[in-house]
Amino acid sequence: MGRLLQIRVSAWTYSEDEVRKTWPSLWDLAWEDSSAIPRKGVMELADAIFDAVRAGLIPDDQAKALREDAEKADKLRLAIEKALGDWQPGEADKLTYALEDVMDALEDIASKF
């Protein structure tokens, strides 16, 4: 790293439209009116669902159904961020697959609401 220029290892969603198509029920649940949200990727959706469950932003029955997997998704999201911060892109890559699997499970639950 230079004195002014820093090198970062990062993860980002290449297509927010794909996120919306892949997890439409979660998208609607988290971002019903999403015009004020600048980034709507996988990491942001995992965070938004966890916040909705934790903070009581959704009905109790929905929060109860989502809670376990929302907590898993949040832990995976944080683990990805840590792996990237520790310059471990291989570990972060493995964790992304686990996060996407948990998001699929959350979508299955949310699609029944």
Image (cartoon, grey):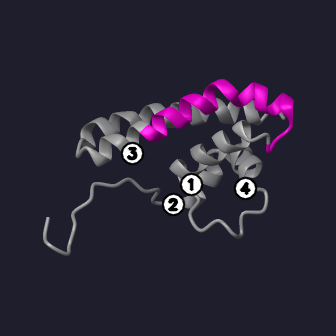
Left or right of 104, for residue 110: right
Residue 76 at x, y = what percent? 47, 34
Please, what is the dominant secondary structure of the magenta stretch? helix
Which residue is identified by label 3? Answer: 81
Q: Assess whether mark 4 and mark 1 are in contact (beta carbons under 8 angstroms).
A: no
Q: Assess whether mark 1 and mark 2 are in contact (beta carbons under 8 angstroms).
A: yes
Q: Quote the CA–CA distance across marks 2 and 3.
A: 19 Å
- Above or below — where is 42 with respect to 103? below
Q: Quote the CA–CA distance across marks 1 and 4.
A: 15 Å
Residue 71 at x, y = what percent? 59, 30
What kind of residue is marked 4?
Trp
Q: Nearer the viewer, residue 36 or 20?
A: 36
Instruction: Give the number of the mark in front: 4 or 3.
Output: 3
Residue 80 at x, y = what percent? 39, 41
What kind of residue is marked 2?
Ser
Which residue is identified by label 4? Answer: 31
Indicate the secondary structure of the residue bearing disc 2.
loop
- Above or below — where is 27 with respect to 93? below
Marks 3 and 1, the one that precedes in the sequence: 1
What kind of residue is marked 3?
Glu
Magenta segment: 57-78
Instruction: Give the number of the mark in front: 3 or 1.
Output: 3
Q: Quote the CA–CA distance across marks 2 and 4.
A: 16 Å
Which residue is identified by label 1? Answer: 18
**Which image quarter holds the N terminus?**
bottom left
At horizontal 39% and vertical 34% (from top left) the residue drawn is 95
Tell me the quarter of the picture where residue 105 sits.
top right
Indicate the secondary structure of the residue bearing disc 1.
helix
At horizontal 21% and vertical 63% (from top left) the residue drawn is 7
